[in-house]
Amino acid sequence: MIYAHIENLIDYALANKLIDGRDTVWARNALLGILHLPAAGKTRCSRRAAAKTPQYPAEILADISFWAAENNLLPADTATYREIFETSLMAVFTRRPSETEARFFHIYKKSGSRKATDWFYKYCQQVYYVKADCAAKNIVWRTQTGFGPLQLAINLAKPEKDPKEIALQSKTPAVNNGYPRCLLCVENEGYYGRLNHPPRQNLRLLPLKLNGADWYFQYSPYVYYNEHSIILSAEHKPMQITGGTFKTLLDFVRMFPHYFIGSNADLPLVGGSILNHEHYQAGRCALPIEKAASVKNFKVKKFPQVSFDIIRWPMSALRLRGGKNDVEEAAAYVFETWRKYGDAQAGITPHSGGKQHNTVTPLARFKKGKYELDIILRNNRTTAARPYGLFNTSPFYHNIKRENIGLLETAGLAVLPGRLKNEIAQITALIQRGKIEKMKDLSSLAQHYEWVKAFLPEYEKEGYKQSDVPAIIAGEIGLAFCKILYDCAVFKHDAAGKEAFLRFINKL
């Protein structure tokens, strides 16, 4: 059957125009070389019955890697080694970086940015770098809150490592040459991969010039929203928000006005999961914060052409709208003012012990003929009572999300850990059976007990059906996410918090 699988993969490549007919013999020989097969065998007589070419090559690749594992072509039969092997197969059909770049910018110049990204996104799916079929496994829903609907996703797209693989990693010598230095370095393009570093042979980057510096555009292999993109610095350097950050973001929006772009904060606790390489996230979707309404419009004397708004959002956020240069300068002014701003009454200390505490999470977009920039105010100060951050997730909600509240969360999209899928199923069963006390005896569910105990009595008073329990839990997770964002607000939504926010506005 291995020869049939080879032909099926070639058919997939032909159907998606990754190669043309003239390339068939070459592609077949390349695959035979990878598989250590001396020659092509009988192929047509053992083809799979389905005549329709699949949308994605996952099943074909799995067939081939299963055969490779049985024939000792993998160092070990683990998910990572299979992924490395399958990526090497798709690399046969992936254009060289120079060819990809030339094709993209040809479309960009001829037909515009939308057509160019349409082509590139589809192409990255076809060569199976963007695993759209894996993303479809994510559990997604919306919860209505007092700040509008929030989006939630339980991340099931990125496969978990099995115990066998973890054991192998413990025996694998550390790579001392530091190549690639991190997952976002340019040197990942075409990299074969290893047990502790994913394969990137089918990754393609597009060079961009933003704010006079070299950047690269790529799509994320595990999709959290439509056309999930990463804009990474050509230089391996730590995340840093400066006055120039806003020009970089708006330069990107000028090139791709149909995309949003945003940056994680640059400090521990309030930053994203990767702080060692400067990068941004972009995409073709409207995150919930985009629909947030204004609660107060004001003017700043230095920037009469810019509209400033406090927006109705769980976190403390400003929205700036206007021409590109004006918004860039105004955003830099807001940022520099906030970096140095302190308010003892509100518990805000800009720095202590030589460490900076105040920073921002910015998001940029082009909307209705104006450049629009949301600036979410952040502070990573800790106390003895709140070691994870005074303006960060309350420990009460660590059962839902313990990780940093990064860019996507601040914009209203919660990316939740995959463990919640099974935990929710178990909680649902115990509630339906009236056995929530048993949660305390189960290691995976004990962390949820106080949370369930807090919200369940209200539903018991109103009466609910067993069939209602999944929707109740989903809704309560959404409300918990809203409260997590509320915890992260530097200016709370009570009277004292509103007064404190106005003091900062007056400072501007």
Image (cartoon, rainbow, N blue to C red):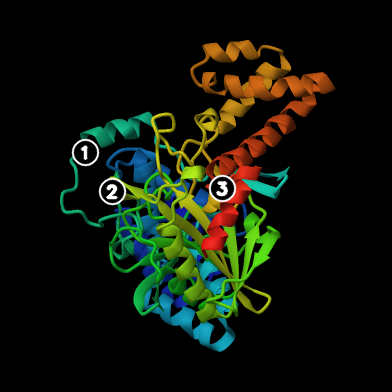
Circle 1 sits in a helix, a strand or a loop, which is it? Answer: loop
Residue that appears at 41% across and 58% down = 339
Relative to residue 242, is residue 368 depicted above or below?
Answer: below
Q: Residue 113 appears in which quarter of the rendering? A: bottom right
Answer with mark 2 or mark 3, whichever residue precedes in sequence: 2
Q: Is residue 283 visible?
A: yes
Residue that appears at 30% across and 38% down = 76
Relative to residue 191, is residue 248 depicted above or below?
Answer: below
**Residue 268 spot, x, y in % from top left:** 37, 47
Q: Amino acid at mark 3?
A: Phe
Q: CA distance from mark 1 to mark 3?
A: 48 Å
Check whether the beta carbons of the residues at disc 1 and disc 3 lie within 8 A of each other. no
Q: Amino acid at mark 2?
A: Arg
**Residue 194 spot, x, y in % from top left:** 28, 48
Answer with mark 1 or mark 3, whichever residue precedes in sequence: 1
Q: Is residue 7 visible?
A: no
Q: CA distance from mark 2 to mark 3?
A: 46 Å
Residue that appears at 62% across and 11% down = 437
Answer with mark 1 or mark 2, whichever residue precedes in sequence: 1
Location of mark 3 (residue): 491
- Mark 1 or 3, which is nearer the eye? 3
Q: Which mark is residue 57?
A: none
- Name of the residue lying farthest toward the bottom: 110
Location of mark 1 (residue): 172
Judge from the rendering whether residue 408 lies leftward or rightward of residue 38; answer left or right.
Answer: right
Give the total number of marks visible in the rendering: 3
- Mark 2 or 3, which is nearer the eye? 3
**Residue 109 spot, x, y in % from top left:** 52, 87
Q: Which mark is residue 194?
A: 2
Q: Amino acid at mark 1?
A: Thr
Q: Nearer the viewer, residue 497 or 115?
A: 497
Circle 3 sits in a helix, a strand or a loop, which is it? Answer: loop
